[in-house]
Image (cartoon, rainbow, N blue to C red):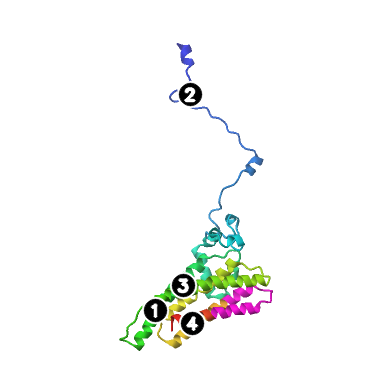
């Protein structure tokens, strides 16, 4: 009997502990060859990972011809923290705050898209409200109807300008032999439109002189912002007429906003 009990497998008995198998530790050289999948968390700049950083290296650059039509190439430019966008908006109103330095190596498209969409809504809504105030001031008993076409015009003008004008200047700068960055130009021109958002709030005042003063101030500030930042990008080259033409186009946009939406 004793011999029979000793032959039973002890690994299935209640309370038995399985034997510990020692695992082989990799050598120092082998541990260095293992792939590291750890992410750096949190990023040191408030959650914003620039597209040029190693963490965003899998995305195609939007400046490459293959990346122009790829949505994935623009994804990193929307990975931006709110504090970064607010800081850049403040710099767009105060051009001396070195806006070009803040977007060097880390331009974003979230701010420009948000600013453009907000400006479209403001121009369509406040443009109609401004015409309503003027109509009621001149004809208190007259009829007034909301002009829905303001929405279409505002969307076409704002988004068309914010996309086409920087793209045109990108190709012109490339033609003159300058290494321009298309996303950087989109970013700069997009933030230059922010000043028209608070200006549109004052343009509803039913006073033509006051409206012209507001649009001249807003157009001058926006034009000067574009001029300074484009001048920094083209420093050391003979492209002064190109920079001046950008200033004139920006001021022409301000005049169009006043004449079409607030007249």
Viewer-nearest of labels 2 and 4?
A: 4
Q: Nearer the viewer, mark 1 or mark 2?
A: 1
Q: Which residue is mark 2?
A: 11
97 versus 30 height, above or below: below
Give the percent coordinates (x, y) of residue 37.
57, 47
Q: Give the x, y percent position of residue 13.
A: 44, 23
- Work out whether mark 3 precedes mark 2 in sequence or the reverse, and give the earlier one: 2
The residue beneath circle 1 is: 128
Q: Left or right of 81: which side holds 228?
A: right
Q: What range of the chain is rendered magenta?
A: 226-251
Separation of residues labelled 1 and 2 (CA atoms): 85 Å
Callouts 3 and 1 close, C-beta under 8 Å: no
Please check the rendered image and state whether residue 169 is part of the magenta-colored stretch, yes or no.
Answer: no
- Look at mark 3 in the image and give the residue it sits on: 155
> Quick check: can you spot residue 119?
no
Q: Which comes before the other along the chain, label 4 or label 3?
A: 3
Front disc: 3 or 1: 3
SS for dot 1: helix
Disc with the residue nearer the chain's start (4 vs 1):
1
The C terminus is located in which quarter? bottom left
Q: Secondary structure at mark 2?
A: helix
Identity of the residue furthest to the left in this view:
141
Crowding near pointer 3: few (<14 within 10 Å), some, many (20+)?
Answer: some
For marks 3 and 1, give the CA distance.
Answer: 15 Å
Q: Residues within 10 Å of mark 1 (few under 14, many from 20)?
A: many
Tag nearer the camera, 4 or 3: 3
């Amino acid at each position: 009997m004793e011999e029979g009990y000793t032959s039973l497998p002890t690994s299935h008995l209640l309370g038995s502990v399985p034997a510990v198998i020692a695992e082989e530790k990799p050598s120092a050289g082998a541990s260095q060859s293992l792939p590291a999948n750890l992410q750096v968390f949190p990023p040191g700049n408030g959650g914003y990972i620039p597209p040029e950083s190693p963490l965003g290296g899998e995305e195609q650059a939007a400046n490459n011809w293959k990346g122009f039509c790829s949505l994935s190439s623009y994804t990193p430019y929307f990975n931006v923290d709110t504090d970064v966008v607010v800081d850049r908006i403040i710099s767009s109103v105060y051009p001396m705050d070195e806006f070009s330095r803040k977007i060097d190596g880390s331009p974003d498209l979230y701010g420009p898209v948000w600013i453009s969409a907000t400006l479209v809504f403001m121009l369509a809504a406040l443009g109609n409200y401004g015409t309503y105030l003027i109509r009621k001031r001149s004809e208190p008993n007259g009829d007034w109807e909301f002009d829905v076409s303001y929405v279409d015009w505002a969307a076409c003008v704002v988004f068309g300008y914010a996309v086409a004008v920087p793209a045109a200047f990108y190709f012109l700068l490339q033609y003159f032999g300058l290494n321009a960055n298309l996303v950087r130009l989109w970013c700069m021109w997009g933030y230059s439109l922010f000043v028209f958002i608070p200006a549109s709030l004052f343009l509803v005042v039913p006073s033509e002189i006051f409206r012209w003063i507001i649009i001249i101030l807003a157009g001058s500030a926006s034009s000067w912002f574009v001029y300074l930042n484009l001048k920094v990008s083209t420093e050391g080259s003979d492209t002064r007429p190109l920079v001046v033409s950008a200033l004139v186009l920006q001021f022409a946009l301000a005049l169009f906003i006043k004449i079409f939406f607030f007249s």
